[in-house]
Image (cartoon, grey):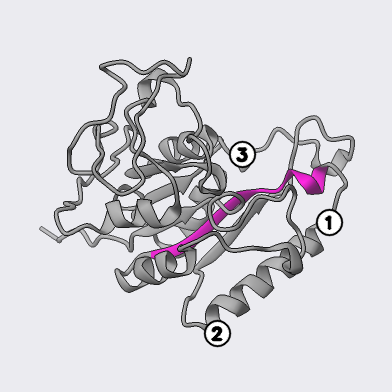
């Protein structure tokens, strides 16, 4: 019997609020501000063999605030900057759509705007990614839902800009590991005791990483079933 060859694992990362400070519709390099610890976190993920993939909703395009050329110009500057310090982005996927847009070309109920999984699936297909062995880091529940729909094996929710509490999650996701910054998620993901869970069965209740916060249900209330507890911090997700 032929042995199944696994594809490469990836770290799927939201952009605004996770990689850079979310000043609101960031589309110029001069307004792009890395959050604390991000560069080192990217470096660690790359060193561990994970493809680095950014997946970002950019509704500012559909709102007429800037154009696709502006986003692509910013992303090229980001690529160049990171490449100059030894970090290579495998892909940057963005969605320009918004169903309520007044611009007909972008008023689309698409498959790429998170929580839809299209951007993740597109990158995975192009790069030969094994989604079950990959992870997502986002600052919104829509990031986590997109990961689940795509079949990404693991996910971590962080606070926007590393400030305040992470976004509320639906009850079935309320036990997801919730952290402050990307660097905290990477610490949890790369800790020595982390064991790849393979194809996930359900979200793993987990905590124990620096910056971890108590999980709450979608109403904001904390309960016994929603509270995080010490575990393996794999953040495994049910498809």
Q: Residue at x 45, y 26 (%)?
A: 169
Q: Residues within 10 Å of mark 2 (few under 14, many from 20)?
A: few
Q: Residues within 10 Å of mark 3 (few under 14, many from 20)?
A: some
* Between discs 3 and 2, the one toward the N terminus: 2
Which residue occupies the foreground of this view, 20 or 117?
Answer: 20
The x and y percentages for residue 94 are: 65, 53
**C-alpha distance separating marks 1 and 3:** 20 Å
Which residue occupies the foreground of this view, 236 or 210?
Answer: 210
Tag nearer the camera, 3 or 2: 2
Q: Is residue 61 magenta?
A: yes
Q: Check disc 1 and report the residue beneath it.
A: 67
Look at the image and tell me in which quarter the N terminus lies.
bottom left
> In this picture, is 199 found above or below 186?
above
> In this picture, is 69 found above or below 211?
below
Q: Check disc 3 and report the residue beneath it.
A: 111
Look at the image and tell me in which quarter the C terminus lies.
top left
The x and y percentages for residue 235 are: 30, 41
In magenta, the rendered stretch is 51-62
**C-alpha distance separating marks 1 and 2:** 26 Å
Query: Which SS class for mark 3?
Result: loop
Which residue occupies the foreground of this view, 31 or 70?
Answer: 31
Q: How many marks?
A: 3
In this rendering, position of residue 109 left or right of residue 3: right
């Amino acid at each position: 019997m032929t042995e199944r060859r696994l594809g490469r694992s990836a770290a799927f990362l939201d952009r605004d609020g996770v990689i850079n400070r979310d000043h609101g519709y960031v589309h110029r390099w001069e307004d792009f501000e890395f959050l604390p610890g991000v560069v080192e976190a990217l470096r660690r993920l790359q060193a561990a063999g994970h493809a680095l993939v950014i997946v970002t909703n950019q509704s500012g395009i559909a709102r007429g605030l800037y154009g696709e050329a502006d986003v692509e110009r910013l992303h090229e500057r980001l690529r160049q900057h990171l490449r100059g310090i030894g970090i290579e982005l495998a892909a940057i996927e963005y969605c320009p759509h918004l169903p309520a847009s007044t611009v007909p070309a972008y008023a689309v109920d698409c498959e790429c705007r998170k929580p839809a999984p299209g951007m993740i699936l597109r990158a995975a297909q192009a790069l030969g990614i094994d989604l079950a062995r990959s992870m997502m880091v986002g600052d919104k529940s829509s990031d986590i839902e997109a990961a689940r729909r795509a079949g990404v094996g693991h996910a971590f929710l962080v606070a926007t800009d590393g400030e305040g509490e992470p976004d509320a999650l639906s009850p079935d996701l309320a036990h997801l590991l919730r952290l402050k910054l990307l660097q905290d998620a990477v610490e949890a993901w790369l800790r020595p005791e982390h064991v790849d869970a393979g194809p996930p069965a359900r979200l793993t209740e987990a905590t124990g990483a620096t910056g971890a916060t108590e999980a709450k249900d979608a109403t904001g209330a904390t309960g016994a079933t929603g509270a995080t507890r010490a575990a393996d911090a794999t953040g495994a997700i049910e498809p």
